[in-house]
Image (cartoon, rainbow, N blue to C red):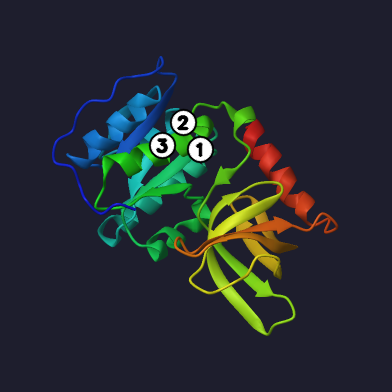
Amino acid sequence: MDRAFGTAVTPLPSSRKASARAALVDLKDPVRSVIADCFRQFGIETTIVSGNAADRLKREKFEACVVRLSPPAEAVTETVVESARTSPSNSRMIIYGLGGSAQDALRFSKYGINAVFREPLERSTAVKLVRATQMLVLHELRRYVRIPVITEISVAVMNENRRLTCTSIEVSSGGMSMRSAEDLFVGQAVEISFSLLTLPRVHVRGSVSWRNQAGRAFGVRFDAQDDRRLKIKTWIDAYLET
């Protein structure tokens, strides 16, 4: 991601009538203004939430929220995301992290952090992130079958005595994308395992379908003969119907 942070914030025009709300939890300017403008471009209203954030996310309906992941905010963030995930109205909301490292994001993986705004924040990359996830926020779910989510993935490389620990990017009923610094080649057979919110740990076979060396990312296509993949499909269907 770009490392520069623009000091001047030019308002982005709203392209549609707002139909969803995102809670900006304890965010400060100028970051807050940048993120608010990015959401506004896609018809998503933002609400500044501070102080009583956990209580508000327990009783008010939001389609998304943005919380800080860096260690100084860790205790508050955990209370907020736990409150959201245990709320009947917000349990499936899209949760964005702000800042922090990959390990910071993984500390909250049991709550299903969906995506992360990296810091220093640059508006063009923030817009790309919102664009990539807006369909879920706006509940236009039929057009978006991949679920962005950050969790730890264990990857066993078949026919090798090797196991990788990766970080997920997106999951679908047909496969997953993830990041790892270790080398894998297209066509390599693997077995992955992970747990996800209400989905207990699942194991499924697959093969590497693509690899982006520069981005340290790769995709795994699930083995159509492995019926364990159906548990993932069932979870995704339930997620999208909520």
Kind of residue indicated by mark 3: Val
Give the answer, above or below, for where 120 lies relative to 53. below
Residue 207 x %, y %: 71, 63
Residue 78 in sight in this render: yes
Kind of residue indicated by mark 1: Ser
Closer-to-camera residue (115/6): 6
Q: Earlier in the sequence, mark 2 or mark 3?
A: 2
Q: Residue at 50% of width from left, 57% of height from top?
A: 109
Q: Nearer the viewer, mark 3 or mark 1?
A: 3
Seen as rendered, the residue at the extreme left is 7
C-alpha separation, residue under disc 2 versus residue under disc 1:
12 Å
Q: Nearer the viewer, mark 2 or mark 3?
A: 3
Q: Residue at 61% of width from left, 69% of height from top?
A: 154
Kind of residue indicated by mark 2: Glu
Residue 59 x %, y %: 43, 30
Residue 65 x %, y %: 39, 38
* Residue on which the image places disc 3: 130
Q: In screen coordinates, is 35 left or right of 157?
A: left
* Residue on which the image places disc 2: 63
Closer-to-camera residue (154/144): 144
Give the answer, above or below, for where 215 lies relative to 18. below
Closer-to-camera residue (147/175): 175
- Label 3 Cα neighbours within 10 Å, binned few <14 / some 14-19 / many ≥20: many
* Residue on which the image places disc 1: 87
Q: In the rendered structure, find residue 33 and report the number of the disc placed on it.
A: none
- Label 1 Cα neighbours within 10 Å, binned few <14 / some 14-19 / many ≥20: some
Q: Which secondary structure, mark 1? A: loop
Residue 48 in sight in this render: no
Q: Earlier in the sequence, mark 2 or mark 1?
A: 2
Residue 127: image quadrant is top left
Q: Which secondary structure, mark 2? A: loop
Q: Are marks 3 and 1 in contact (CB under 8 Å)?
A: no
